[in-house]
Amino acid sequence: MADEEVKFERLERKKCTVRKCNKVAVQGGVCIAHGAVVKTKKCSVPTCNKVAVQGGVCVAHGAVVKTKKCSVPKCDKYPQQGGVCVAHGAVKKRKKCSVPTCDKRVVRGGVCEEHGATRKKCSVPTCDKAAVQGGVCEEHGATRKKCTVRKCNKVAVQGGVCIAHGAVVKTKRKK
C-alpha cells in the first residue's frame, strides 16, 4: 500500500506558484496564464502563423493528421474507449453530483444545477437562455463552430466534429 502512494505522488504535476492558482506549472514554476512561454514550431509557409503539425507545415498547407477510426469494419466514427466508438460499445464515464442521493451529472464545482452549480446566462435582460459565446445565446448573436468534415454543416460538438462524425453525445436529463 505504501508503494502505491509513493507511485501516485511521482505522477502528480507541479502546480503554478502564483497564489490561488491551481493550474499546472509549465515553465519556471508558473502556468501559461501567468507567463510561461511554450515554444511551438510555426508553419514554414512565410505568410502563415499556424502551428506546424507535420513536415514543417500546418494542416492548411499539406500536413496530414492521421486519426484513428473505430475498429469495426465499415465504421468511420472515432473510437472513444477500447478502440470502438459509442455506437459499438464504448462507454464514457461521466462525473456524478457529489451529493450522495443525486445521480445527475456535474455541471460545475462537483455538483449539478439542482445542488448549486450555475451556468452563465445570456446578457440580454429579457433572456433566460444559457450563454454560448461572448455572453449571449445563439438567438442573440452567438455563433457555433461547424463540423470540419467536408460538406457537413452540422454544429461541431467535440474535437471539431459533429455527433455524426464521432463526437461524444452529451445528453440532458429530464426533470
Image (spheres, grey):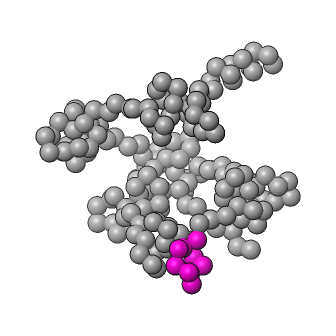
Q: Is residue 146 above or below residue 96?
A: below
Q: Is 118 in front, or is 98?
A: 118
Residue 163 spot, x, y in % from top left? 47, 62
Q: Is residue 84 visible?
A: no
Quadrant position of the C terminus in the picture: bottom right
Residue 50 lies within the magenta run = no
Q: Residue furthest left?
A: 46
Residue 153 spot, x, y in % from top left? 34, 69
Residue depicted at x 62% and y 65% = 119
Q: Is 80 in front, or is 101?
A: 101
Residue 127 lies within the magenta run = yes
Q: Residue furthest front?
A: 19
User: Which residues fall within the magenta stretch?
Assistant: 121-129
Q: Is residue 123 above or below residue 107?
A: below
Q: Residue furthest top?
A: 3
Residue 20 spot, x, y in % from top left? 64, 39
Name the magenta segment's main secondary structure: loop
Residue depicted at x 50% and y 68% = 135
Q: Quadrant of residue 3?
A: top right
